[in-house]
Image (cartoon, helix red, strand yellow):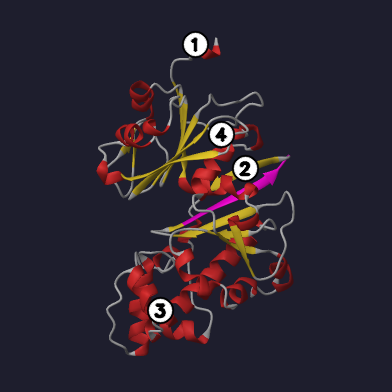
């Protein structure tokens, strides 16, 4: 594993970008003490590639072109051509250097970027759910039900934060309560199993809603996450029960993640689904499921859980890395590309 050396510093301005399947979000960091300067977002479908999106979205917002780009993408970073999972773009760092005049491009996993944001959250960036208190300089965990279920740990060791992305969203998810045991036989299996992401995500919510409707012997057409959350706002019985089961199961998975890495620094919920189901996360059932981990209930009660309220957590994580790379041990091997050195560095 290759980490930045103590003398590592990025050439400013640094462009940070959060590239999703639907939208690309951009911001600039002008210096180590400068605030994050948002440059807006654009639909990936509106541009042939990331270079076009940067020219159209970022360049009109700055007189000084960025010298470094740090990009977060959903999926693994392998090779010089990185295809997006849910969009037509292929990220080509060497092409970006050539066409945009960049000196360096770094590409990270999207939940690695989410993890990089965790140590810097304060005030209204997060909303605590339930009891517990952050232990300073301790491991944190981020779990994000969005299109899928992303997960990453932020380990603190040797006075350094170490982001560790993984596929924790694909752990098994079995029944626990009597109600669970009645609903689970109705859940569609994927690949012969029920994984957490198969229920606890935007794509999983309709699958869970169909199972709940069958269990309740109710006819419902709840085929999108939006239709489920909207129906729940109208107190539709199937939608409400679906989100109750969802929140309870999310609490169990979050608790499992907390136990796995002993995240005394807290577990943080992000992702596109989370802000749309706040009332189901704050009514006590999510937290009760999180803490019910015999024989460690006392330990779990001390670990805090949070809803992330920061509007651009991945961008802020990348910006934190851009300002203070020495504070993080990020694996740069195979994810860093360099171009010609600027005359400003001579």
Give the mark nearest the N terminus, 2 or 3. Answer: 2
Span of residues in magenta: 150-158
- Assess whether residue 157 is covered by the magenta stretch: yes
Callout 3: few (<14), some (14-19), or many (20+) C-alpha neighbours within 10 Å? some
Pointer 1 residue: 343
Query: Residues under labels 1 and 3: Cα distance?
Result: 59 Å
**Where does the image place residue 312, in percent across and percent down from the top left?**
49, 49
Q: In the structure shown, which secondary structural element does the residue marked by tag 4 occupy?
A: helix
Instruction: Give the label on residue 322, or none.
Output: 4
Q: In the structure shown, which secondary structural element does the residue marked by tag 3 occupy?
A: helix
| Quadrant housing the N terminus | top right
Seen at 60% across and 58% down, the residue is 126
Give the mark nearest the N terminus, 4 or 3. Answer: 3
Q: Which of marks 4 and 2 is in front?
A: 4
Between residue 127 and residue 188, name the one nearer to us. Answer: 127
Residues at badges 1 and 3 in contact (C-beta under 8 Å)?
A: no
**Where does the image place residue 306, in percent across and percent down from the top left?**
60, 62
Give the mark nearest the N terminus, 1 or 3. Answer: 3
**Where does the image place residue 133, in percent across and percent down from the top left?**
72, 62
Pointer 2 residue: 162
- Assess whether residue 43 is covered by the magenta stretch: no
Q: In this view, does 335 lie above or below 112?
A: above
Pointer 3 residue: 232
| Quadrant housing the C terminus | top right
């Amino acid at each position: 594993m290759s980490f930045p050396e103590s003398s590592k510093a990025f050439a400013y301005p640094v462009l940070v970008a959060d590239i999703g399947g639907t939208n690309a979000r951009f911001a600039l960091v002008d210096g180590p003490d400068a605030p994050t300067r948002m440059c807006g977002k654009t639909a990936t479908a509106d541009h042939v590639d990331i270079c076009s999106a940067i020219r159209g979205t970022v360049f009109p917002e700055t007189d000084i072109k960025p010298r470094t780009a740090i990009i977060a993408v959903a999926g693994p970073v392998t090779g010089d051509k990185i295809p997006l999972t849910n969009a037509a773009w292929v990220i080509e760092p060497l092409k970006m250097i050539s066409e945009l005049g960049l000196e360096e491009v770094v590409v990270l996993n999207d939940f690695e970027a989410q993890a990089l944001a965790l140590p810097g959250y304060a005030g209204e960036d997060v909303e605590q759910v339930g009891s517990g208190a952050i232990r300073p300089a301790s491991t944190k965990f981020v779990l994000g039900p969005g299109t899928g279920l992303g997960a990453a740990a932020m380990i603190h060791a040797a006075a350094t934060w170490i982001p560790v992305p993984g596929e924790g969203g694909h752990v098994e998810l079995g029944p626990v309560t009597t109600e669970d045991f009645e609903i689970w036989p109705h859940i569609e299996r994927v690949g012969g199993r029920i994984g957490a992401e198969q229920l606890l995500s935007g794509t999983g919510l309709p699958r869970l809603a169909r199972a709940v409707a069958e269990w309740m012997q109710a006819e419902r057409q709840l085929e999108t996450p939006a239709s489920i959350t909207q129906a729940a706002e109208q107190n539709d019985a199937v939608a409400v029960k679906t989100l109750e089961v969802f929140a309870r199961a999310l609490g169990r998975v979050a608790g499992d993640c907390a136990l796995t890495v002993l995240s005394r620094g807290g577990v943080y919920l992000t992702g596109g689904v989370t802000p749309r189901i706040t009332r189901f996360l704050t009514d006590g059932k999510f937290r009760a499921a999180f803490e019910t981990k015999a024989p460690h209930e006392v330990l779990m009660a001390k670990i805090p859980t949070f809803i992330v309220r920061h509007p651009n957590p991945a961008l802020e994580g990348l910006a934190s890395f851009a300002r203070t790379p020495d504070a993080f041990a990020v694996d740069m091997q195979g994810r860093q590309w360099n171009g010609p050195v600027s005359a400003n560095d001579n």
